[in-house]
Image (tube, coloured by chain):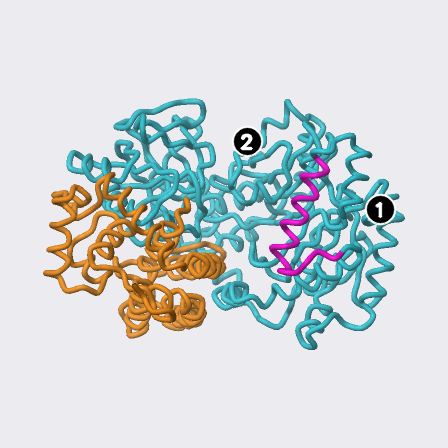
Chain colours: A orange, B cyan
């Protein structure tokens, strides 16, 4: 199906199925944002998945679209098949190694964004010290550059991973332009996307957290 | 010697040469407390290494001499086939950078030396476990094959610790904590003591006072049959320190004596990392102070009452930032409450609600009132449950885990790293402290102190804390102003007088 050297392209149905696997119960808009597909297309895929018994929509304040048990099993099988068919297990495993090296530092940075030591006491960072926030963002920018290198092969092998680069870079750019929510707080924050990438690498390799 | 200093009471080099860890160990030695013999490679060698990309001239010779001295003191040979000496190789700069730099344990345990250790102890399993830990820690630190000769191992390990000063994560840590980048780390090399040796061995951490409340009772945790890194990693199930009183009375008595000695000397609360091997206590690290919030207030007033410090010093030790806890509710008298388990507070505040074991049930139950989500750990799949919950508890993870980051982002009181906790999703129950609680049970989490409590506990009006009231009375006496003002302001007025 794929020419050697060109990245594997995942079908829209699996893209949407797997987005739910990595995100939990989420709104249609967030699935669209994660996959980069237009909203109506995502909705039509979601309906197909629901008809097949793989996805379901739960109402209420904390509801949204999510996978059924069958959907979860189907995703595990299809994602593993895709990995084997593309022959990219080694590339993904290496990217995961690189990710694990960066993950503690990313979590340090998120912690420092939320709490800072004042007089020896960890207190909530109320973002009233722009110099401190700038220090955190500078280090996050540096980490993001290293993450890009670690994930370059991954995106070159499987196109669907390229979306994480776009989303991470977007979150960082918004945080740097003053939208402070885009480091840890918003559902599209750097941490939220990173957390999903972590889940995706685990799910793709069939590993437990 | 130029680069290397013995870990001996007469050593007078300051902490910026020896690193805070070794400096503390030298202090323990002066108090005649038990510290494994060893030596320190000073921070100067690290700076030279980072400048020139190789270990400084003369260090190799000094290492040979220092190892020979250590062999003489212990009556063992590094990597020897009989009575082998193994050493720990640890980083330690002027300031604390916990977990940022490399540590190698059991170095010198070549395959041959491990055989020797097995023969000496009559315990092959122990010897192999020790060798396995060496290989794992060496691989994690160096990314290079293990040299056959023990001195080659030591040289590579020292270089690896020096290099770890400049890893991106360590650089980020210093940047975030306003620490200089050019100081370098010292390396402490000590004869191994084996917490994994036998039933009468183990590791732990001991506080001279309760770090949550400041109460003058020893507090801490212990792990039998394990080396210290297992305690710190939070991956294993520790027991309360107090069990040592019955199981290893000599170790317990030794710890109490050591904490008394350190407190009297440093005039502050302290904590000790320790290992005991076959019933014999060894101290591996000491820290003074570092208590925060209500605990800082309690310790300062108690130390003044005990006559260890002046009241003015008690006031100096409580920064106004420590009073921020006044605005965060806490569970009152945790000692009297029905404590289910304890973990690490990851996001301050108290939440009370009904227990849910999955994100889905949390989202469902939240329609009928507040819910506490209790999970082994959290993944993105739990996000809707976290959003629905009033508070969060996880069995695994530390204050810098995804769960902690998300809880703080959502401002939910959270307790993480409750090692004693098992979540049985199939049975919809939670087990901890020998008890099983079904979903729907009313529980409370205290995200400051890390307690998980059954039922609806009494919440503390923090400002009524009698120790705080005493401290503030002292502050008013000093400033001569007894008018009604916010607590932090009363403290600041006293600090202004003290600074004159």
Task: Using the image, determine if residue B379 lies above or below residue B203.
Answer: below
Label 2, residues with CA under 10 Å away: few <14, some 14-19, many ≥20: some
Q: Secondary structure at mark 2?
A: strand
- Name which residue lies at 64% across and 22% down: B246
Asked whether residue B494 appears in the rendered view, the answer is no
- Name which residue lies at 64% across and 66% down: B163
- Name which residue lies at 33% across and 55% down: A82
Q: CA distance from mark 1 to mark 2?
A: 37 Å
Q: Is residue B146 magenta?
A: yes
Asked whether residue B181 appears in the rendered view, the answer is yes
Magenta: predominant secondary structure element? helix
Mark 2 — on which chain does it sit? B
Q: Is residue B158 magenta?
A: no
Mark 1 — on which chain does it sit? B
| Furthest-bottom residue in this view | B52
Across and down, in percent, residue B101 comes to: 60, 59
- Report which residue position mark 2 lands on: B240
Q: Where is the N terminus of chain B found, in terms of image quarters?
A: bottom right
User: What stretch of residues is rendered in magenta?
Assistant: B126-147
Task: Using the image, determine if residue B216 lies above or below residue B44.
Answer: above
Residue nearest the observer in this picture, B254 or B7 = B7
Residue nearest the observer in this picture, B29 or B97 = B97
Specify the quadrant of the image occupied by residue B241: top right
- Name which residue lies at 39% across and 38% down: B376
Specify the quadrant of the image occupied by residue A158: bottom left
Task: Using the image, determine if residue B469 lies above or below residue B56.
Answer: above
- Report which residue position mark 1 lands on: B80
Left or right of B403? Residue B471 is: right
Q: Secondary structure at mark 1?
A: loop
Residue A129 is marked as none
Label 1, residues with CA under 10 Å away: few <14, some 14-19, many ≥20: many
């Amino acid at each position: 199906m794929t020419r050697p050297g060109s990245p594997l392209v995942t079908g829209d149905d699996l893209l949407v199925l797997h987005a739910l696997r990595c995100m939990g119960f989420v709104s249609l808009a967030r699935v669209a944002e994660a996959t980069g597909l237009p909203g109506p297309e995502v909705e039509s895929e979601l309906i197909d998945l629901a008809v097949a018994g793989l996805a379901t929509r739960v109402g209420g304040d904390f509801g949204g679209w999510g996978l059924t048990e069958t959907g979860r099993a189907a995703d595990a099988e299809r994602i593993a098949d895709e990995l084997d068919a593309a022959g990219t297990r080694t590339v993904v495993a290496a990217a995961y190694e690189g990710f694990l090296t960066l993950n503690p530092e990313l979590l340090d940075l998120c912690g420092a964004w939320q709490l800072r030591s004042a007089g020896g006491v960890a207190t909530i960072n109320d973002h009233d010290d722009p110099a401190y926030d700038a220090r955190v963002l500078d280090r996050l920018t540096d980490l993001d550059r290293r993450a890009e290198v670690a994930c370059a092969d991954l995106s070159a092998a499987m196109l669907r991973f390229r979306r994480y680069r776009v989303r991470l870079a977007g979150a960082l750019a918004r945080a740097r332009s003053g939208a402070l929510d885009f480091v840890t707080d918003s559902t599209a924050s750097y941490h939220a996307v990173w957390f999903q990438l972590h889940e995706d690498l685990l799910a793709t390799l069939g590993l437990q957290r | 010697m130029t680069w290397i200093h013995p870990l001996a009471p007469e050593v007078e080099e300051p902490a910026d040469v020896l690193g805070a860890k070794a400096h503390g160990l030298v202090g323990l030695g002066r108090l005649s407390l038990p510290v494994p013999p060893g030596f320190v490679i000073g921070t100067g060698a690290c700076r030279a290494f980072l400048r020139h990309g190789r270990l400084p001239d003369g260090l190799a010779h000094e290492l040979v001499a220092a190892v020979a001295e250590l062999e003489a003191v212990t009556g063992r040979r590094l990597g020897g086939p009989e009575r082998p000496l193994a050493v720990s190789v640890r980083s330690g700069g002027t300031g604390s950078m916990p977990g940022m730099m490399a540590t190698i344990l059991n170095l010198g345990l070549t395959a041959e030396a491990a055989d020797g250790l097995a023969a000496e102890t009559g315990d092959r399993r122990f010897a192999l476990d020790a060798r396995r830990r060496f290989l794992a820690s060496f691989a994690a630190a160096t990314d290079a094959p293990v040299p056959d000769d023990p001195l080659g191992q030591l040289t590579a390990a020292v270089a690896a610790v020096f290099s770890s000063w400049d890893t991106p994560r360590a650089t980020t840590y210093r940047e975030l904590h306003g620490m200089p980048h050019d100081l370098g780390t010292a390396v402490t090399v000590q004869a191994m003591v084996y917490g994994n040796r036998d039933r009468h061995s183990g590791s732990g951490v001991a506080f001279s006072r309760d770090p949550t409340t400041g109460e003058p009772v020893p507090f801490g945790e212990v792990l039998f049959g394990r080396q210290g890194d297992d305690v710190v990693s939070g991956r294993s199930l520790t027991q309360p320190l107090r069990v040592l009183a019955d199981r290893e009375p000599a170790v317990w008595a030794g710890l109490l004596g050591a904490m008394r000695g350190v407190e009297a000397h440093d005039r502050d609360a302290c904590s000790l990392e320790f290992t005991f091997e076959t019933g014999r206590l060894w101290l591996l690290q000491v820290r003074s102070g570092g208590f925060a919030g209500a605990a800082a207030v309690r310790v300062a007033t108690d130390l003044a009452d005990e006559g260890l410090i002046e009241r003015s010093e008690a006031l100096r030790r409580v920064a106004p930032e420590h009073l921020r806890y006044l605005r965060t509710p806490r569970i009152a008298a945790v000692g009297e409450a029905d404590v289910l388990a304890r973990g690490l507070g990851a996001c301050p505040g108290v939440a009370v609600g009904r227990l849910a074991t999955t994100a889905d049930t949390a989202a469902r139950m939240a329609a009928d009132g507040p819910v506490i989500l209790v999970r082994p750990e959290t993944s993105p799949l739990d996000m809707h449950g976290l959003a629905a919950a009033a508070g969060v508890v996880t069995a695994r993870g530390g204050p810098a885990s995804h769960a902690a980051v998300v809880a703080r982002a959502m401002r939910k009181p959270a307790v993480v790293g409750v090692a004693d906790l098992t979540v049985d999703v199939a049975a919809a129950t939670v087990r901890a402290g020998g008890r099983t609680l079904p979903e729907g049970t009313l529980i409370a989490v205290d995200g400051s102190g890390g307690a998980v409590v059954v039922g609806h506990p009494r919440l503390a009006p923090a400002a009524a804390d009698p120790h705080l009231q005493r401290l503030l009375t002292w502050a008013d006496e000093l400033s001569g102003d007894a008018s009604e003002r916010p607590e932090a302001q009363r403290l600041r007025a006293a600090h202004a007088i003290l600074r004159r």
